[in-house]
Amino acid sequence: SQTIHQWPATLVQPVGSPLSLECTVEGTSNPNLYWYRQAAGRGLQLLFYSVGIGQISSEVPQNLSASRPQDRQFILSSKKLLLSDSGFYLCAWSVGRKQPQHFGDGTRLSIL
Amino acid sequence: KQEVTQIPAALSVPEGENLVLNCSFTDSAIYNLQWFRQDPGKGLTSLLLIQSSQREQTSGRLNASLDKSSGRSTLYIAASQPGDSATYLCAVYAGNMLTFGGGTRLMVKP
């Protein structure tokens, strides 16, 4: 069966520090991968999606970037965090764009 | 731009009641609609997915319907239980992205 792992579960970082959140999927090949952010009172927003290694599409301009160095690994990064980057970050995968998306347990990021 | 609205924002019911959660979307050109459950501080659990060509899907006590032409979906929960307490999110898939509603926070009281 397929599983998705995100880490860390919680993270507290100072403003201006770098960020790296990792997501890996097991049990499937060539998944579509997604990063979402859920900010307080704002709902879920798609940040990035990837249909293959090295292929990244961004839905909103922002301080963050994403990379897909391996088929089942998706990384969310920032060189300098802003206060507005606080939120709950969720990774998801699907076998195709018309198939269900399955989510990880999320990373709660607090910026001080 | 697709917009998804969920009504009500919060709902409190006694255990055993049947209930309906509503979801509406502005652009009917969708591939599918997905219902999720989110427990506090947790990720999303997929409940049901309805393809655009389908009218409904059922899983256990859950039944989701889709009326694409009117831009509406409902999630029906039969014989609600305290363990059903969570936030329920609907999302429509179009283009390359899911667009989420704001969710309905459900509390089922024993």
Image (cartoon, rainbow, N blue to C red):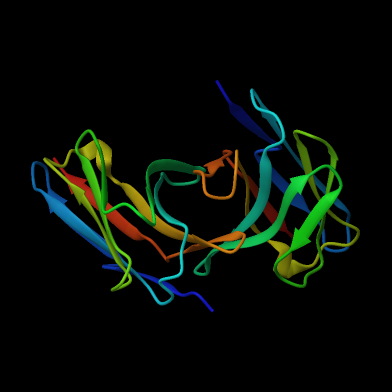
- Tell me if B14 is positioned left or right of B8 in this view: left
Location of the N terminus of chain A by quadrant is top right
Q: Is residue A6 above or below residue A85?
A: above
Residue, far right? A79
Expressed as whole percent of the image width and height from the top left, the position of residue B66 reads 29, 59
Q: Quadrant of residue A7?
A: top right
Location of the C terminus of chain A by quadrant is bottom right
- Tell me if B81 is positioned left or right of B43 in this view: left
Name the one closer to the observer, A53 or A9. Answer: A53
The structure residue drawn at horizontal position 79% and vertical position 34%, both measured from the top left corner, is: A71
Q: Quadrant of residue A28?
A: top right
Expressed as whole percent of the image width and height from the top left, the position of residue A46 reads 63, 61
Name the one closer to the observer, A36 or B26. Answer: B26
Expressed as whole percent of the image width and height from the top left, the position of residue B85 reads 28, 45
The structure residue drawn at horizontal position 55% and vertical position 41%, both measured from the top left corner, is: A103
The structure residue drawn at horizontal position 52% and vertical position 49%, both measured from the top left corner, is: A98
Expressed as whole percent of the image width and height from the top left, the position of residue B9 reads 31, 67
Name the one closer to the observer, A49 or A83. Answer: A49
